[in-house]
Image (spheres, rainbow, N blue to C red):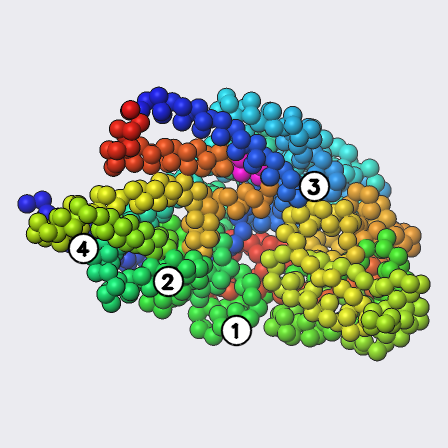
């Protein structure tokens, strides 16, 4: 009896399953789904130093100023500003009538609260405090005027004020590390927080009261797709509307269907940093030889499938301070050998260069898992082997690579991608003062460069700054503490029906309120 | 029996302390730093120092462990470095997804695997038997990431029947049917691996029992072969299958790292990977401890099921 029931029950279940599974036709919601392999850590602008969190945060929060795709600064919560003649005081007039997403009024108190928290050594963790080290205090002049006091003039200061302003009424006397605000942010930006399911998605909805141009789509959804191969399939399939293209070789295939458009922007300089404490690299002729030995054009064509531009410095060609006329080192292995011979390096019995009984043997490392960089170090090992240098190429898991090797300066040569900053100031990478607390892990020190960088920060005149940075880029290209290879193109595949997209090198979403479906 | 369980519980507590000590040491011996995950190459020494101070990482390592044990004993497993939420909340959020995926897969794998195993044993050395053996071996040895991408290519890209990842439709309607469609591919990949294991184990265990004298008697009595297989052989061949099931229980929660990554399934396996990359020490500790506890409960349940399935075991313990 019971047994007779089994077959019909299974049948009913299977039928029910498939009926339930039939996809229902529904009108397309006015939403854009962004597929990404990364997810934010926190949505609190005060505590998020990383670029992934910040690109989500910049849709929810507004700063005093904002940057466009050319890294030009524009008014945001601040309507106008002026600096004192000595460059140490900056006064900002704030926009009236701006509301937080919870309906409260935005005022100068929120601005003071945000920056007081960042510079307070007791509040931790926060965005990089070193960036704001010159900020002494913030004063509320009236509810819509706020004044910043700096210890010394700093031309790059304005670019730091893209930092999202956080609401004092929700965050005061909260523990920054554990406040629920980190996951339920309230800002003044074009999009409001809706939901965040860890490992799955982040959903933002339109802020109808945004002070700028009102957003055109109702929702922007980040869909977390951890596997980049699957992400490419989903972009091709229409399961996501926007996605970064990780493998340059996928780009052509994605574009061929006609349903997708590609938008691209340049990424930071992919370069080989040399450890100048190492006696091997102290002779500039050796550094030049290393550069002449590398065929950058071939790296771009073969590894990047053409999706990169030869690099000359850490500044992008789109920056107003970029200097295109600096010494470059085209592929010339013969010249490299001559330079090395001049520097006293002679081939030994095993073909490896030697000098005073010491073999020219170095390690070249990069972070594991980044396919392009892994291929580049193997190619460079080959190029350098051809001029008689023994290279041990190795990769290491990213976190320990950065912590134990790069930041501690414990390397011979490392392949890295420099981060892109809004302001062209190069001090944090190359100034002597940045050796101890900063990113000058190369241990590069050049008093002439230090003076130029200091001088460029001390003036607010853009023309003077431009000249100083042009000269700084020339010095760096001559001294060659790092060998610049290329600026990779970040490519984003977009549903061709979406318009308004203009990715910037620092943020895809800087103008998300203007994105719309045709 | 109850004394048996009490002594097992005491052993389990001791084991958990050892597991926590081992995990703590391993995690901390691994190179890298949680602050670096956030700040990247733009980290300054000051930022890292402040970050470490905030989370008590500047204390001597044994003090940190003692602090952790004291708090954990009081039910406080610490907070995630990522967004400051309690570890238990971070882990609990991921459990349903893993449970659903692995539970569905285990259900299918057991039913299909055991069925195929019984069938293969009944038709030993026939073409069917060989075909099932071959299939089982293929399923068990196909790499999950390859199988996953292959199924996505066929069912999502080529045929367009099923979504290629995620747990629900993010924009628009999301109901039970939507969940099932998202579940189909990852559960199938996960189940196929276990089908092979269950089929192989059931088949060999059945064959062993079938060789027993009492079954020859049963056949001589003229019982139908189906009755022999299902009523007289299978219950006696069940023990290895129960062992395998017991061993699968921790897997229900630890999650399937590779399959969850390929299919963007927000489960425990992904959490494990993410927290390892972030060096999110409290989350790693919490997840390992919770999975270890469940592994212990799983093996305890398997032992109890043994006693139920094999009355000889229960009797010998009583004597």
User: Within the image, what quadrant is residue B60 found in?
Assistant: top right
Query: What secondary structure is marked by label 3?
Result: loop
Answer whether labels 2 and 3 touch (C-beta < 8 Å): no
Dot 3 surroundings within 10 Å: few (below 14), some, or many (20 or more)?
many
Residue at image position (86%, 60%) is A281
Whether marks 2 and 3 lie on the same chain = no
Cα distance between the residues tagged 1 and 3:
39 Å
Dot 2 surroundings within 10 Å: few (below 14), some, or many (20 or more)?
some
One can see residue B169 in this view: no
Q: Quadrant where the N terminus of chain B lies?
A: top left
Mark 4 falls within which chain? A
Q: Residue A128, labelled with which disc? A: 3
Q: Residue B7, labelled with which disc? A: none
Query: What secondary structure is marked by label 1?
Result: helix
Q: Residue A15, labelled with which disc? A: 4
Q: Quadrant where the C terminus of chain B lies?
A: top left
Answer whether labels 1 and 2 touch (C-beta < 8 Å): no
Which callout, 1 or 3, points at the residue further toward the start of the chain? 3
One can see residue B309 in this view: yes
Whether marks 3 and 4 lie on the same chain = yes
- Tell me which segment is drawn in magenta: B280-285
Q: Which residue in the protein does label 2 denote?
A: B138
Question: Percent x, y for residue A273?
Answer: 77, 58
Q: Is residue A227 above or below residue A248?
A: above
Q: Which residue in the protein does label 1 denote?
A: A252
Residue situated in front as seen by the camera: B103 or A249: B103
């Amino acid at each position: 009896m019971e047994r007779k029931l089994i077959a019909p029950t299974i049948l009913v279940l299977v039928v029910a399953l498939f009926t339930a599974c039939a996809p229902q036709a529904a009108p397309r919601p006015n939403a854009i789904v962004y597929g990404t392999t990364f997810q934010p850590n926190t949505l609190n602008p005060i505590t998020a130093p990383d670029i992934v969190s910040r690109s989500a945060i910049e849709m929810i929060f507004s700063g005093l100023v904002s940057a466009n795709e050319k890294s030009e600064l524009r008014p945001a919560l601040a309507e106008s500003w002026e600096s004192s003649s000595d460059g140490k005081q900056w006064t900002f007039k704030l926009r009236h009538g701006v509301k937080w997403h919870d309906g409260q009024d935005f005022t100068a108190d929120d601005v003071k609260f945000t920056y007081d928290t960042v510079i307070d050594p007791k509040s931790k963790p926060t965005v990089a405090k070193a960036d704001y080290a010159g900020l002494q205090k913030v004063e509320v002049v009236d509810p819509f005027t706020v004044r910043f006091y700096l210890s010394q003039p700093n031309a790059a200061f304005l670019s730091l004020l893209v930092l999202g302003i956080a609401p004092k009424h929700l965050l005061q006397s909260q523990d920054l590390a554990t406040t629920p605000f980190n996951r339920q942010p309230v800002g003044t930006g074009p999009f409001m927080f809706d939901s965040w399911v860890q490992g799955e998605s982040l959903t933002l909805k339109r802020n109808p009261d945004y002070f700028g141009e009102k957003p055109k789509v109702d929702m922007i959804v980040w869909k977390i797709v951890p596997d980049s191969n699957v992400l490419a399939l989903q972009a091709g399939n229409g399961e996501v509307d926007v996605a970064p293209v990780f493998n340059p070789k996928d780009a052509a295939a994605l574009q061929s269907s006609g349903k997708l458009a590609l938008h691209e922007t340049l990424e930071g300089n992919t370069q080989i940093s040399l450890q100048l404490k190492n006696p091997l690299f102290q002779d500039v002729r050796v550094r030049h030889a290393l550069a002449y030995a590398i065929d950058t054009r071939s790296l771009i064509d073969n590894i990047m499938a053409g999706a990169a531009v030869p690099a000359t410095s850490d500044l992008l060609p789109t920056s107003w301070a970029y200097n295109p006329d600096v010494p470059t080192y085209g592929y010339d292995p013969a010249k490299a050998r001559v330079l090395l011979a001049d520097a006293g390096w002679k081939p030994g019995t095993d073909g490896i260069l030697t000098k005073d009984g010491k073999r020219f043997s170095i390690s070249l490392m990069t972070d594991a898992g980044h396919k392009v960089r892994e291929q580049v170090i193997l190619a460079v090992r080959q190029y350098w082997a051809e001029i008689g240098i023994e290279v041990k190429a190795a990769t290491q898991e990213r976190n320990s690579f950065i912590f134990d090797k790069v930041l501690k300066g414990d390397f011979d040569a490392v392949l890295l991608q420099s981060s892109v900053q809004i302001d062209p100031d190069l001090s944090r990478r190359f100034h002597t003062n940045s050796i101890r607390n900063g990113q000058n892990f190369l241990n590069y020190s050049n008093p002439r460069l230090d003076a130029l960088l200091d001088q460029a920060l001390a003036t607010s005149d853009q023309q003077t700054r431009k000249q100083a940075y042009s000269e700084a880029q020339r010095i760096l290209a001559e001294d060659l503490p790092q060998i610049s290879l290329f600026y990779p193109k970040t490519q984003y595949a977009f549903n061709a029906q979406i318009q308004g997209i203009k990715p910037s090198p620092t943020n895809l979403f800087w103008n998300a309120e203007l994105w719309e479906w045709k | 029996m109850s004394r048996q369980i009490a002594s097992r519980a005491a052993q389990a507590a001791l084991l958990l302390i050892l597991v926590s000590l081992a995990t703590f040491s391993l995690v901390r011996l691994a190179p890298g730093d949680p602050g670096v995950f956030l700040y990247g190459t733009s980290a300054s020494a000051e930022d890292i120092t402040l970050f470490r101070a905030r989370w008590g990482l500047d204390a001597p390592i044994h003090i940190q462990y003692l602090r952790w044990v004291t708090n954990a004993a009081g039910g406080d497993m610490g907070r995630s470095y990522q967004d400051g939420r309690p570890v238990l909340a971070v882990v609990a959020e991921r459990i349903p997804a893993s449970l659903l995926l692995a539970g569905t897969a285990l259900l299918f794998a057991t039913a299909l695997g055991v069925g195929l195993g019984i069938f293969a044993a009944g038709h030993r050395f026939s073409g069917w038997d060989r075909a099932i053996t071959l299939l089982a071996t293929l399923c068990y040895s196909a790499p999950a990431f390859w199988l996953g991408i292959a199924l996505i290519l066929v069912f999502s890209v080529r045929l367009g029947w099923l979504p290629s990842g995620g747990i629900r439709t993010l924009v628009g309607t999301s109901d039970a049917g939507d969940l099932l469609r998202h579940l189909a591919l990852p559960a199938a990949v996960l189940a196929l691996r276990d089908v092979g294991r269950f089929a192989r184990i059931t088949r060999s265990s059945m064959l062993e029992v079938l060789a027993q004298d009492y079954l020859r008697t049963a056949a001589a009595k003229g019982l139908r072969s189906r009755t022999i297989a299902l009523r007289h052989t299978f219950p006696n061949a069940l023990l290895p299958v129960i062992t395998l099931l017991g061993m699968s229980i921790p897997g229900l929660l630890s999650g399937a790292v590779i399959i969850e990554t390929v299919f963007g399934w927000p489960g425990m396996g992904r959490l494990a990977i993410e927290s390892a990359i972030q060096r999110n020490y409290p989350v790693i500790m919490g997840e390992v401890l919770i999975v270890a506890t469940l592994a212990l409960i799983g093996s305890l349940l398997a032992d109890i099921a043994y006693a139920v399935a094999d009355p000889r075991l229960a009797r010998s313990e009583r004597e």
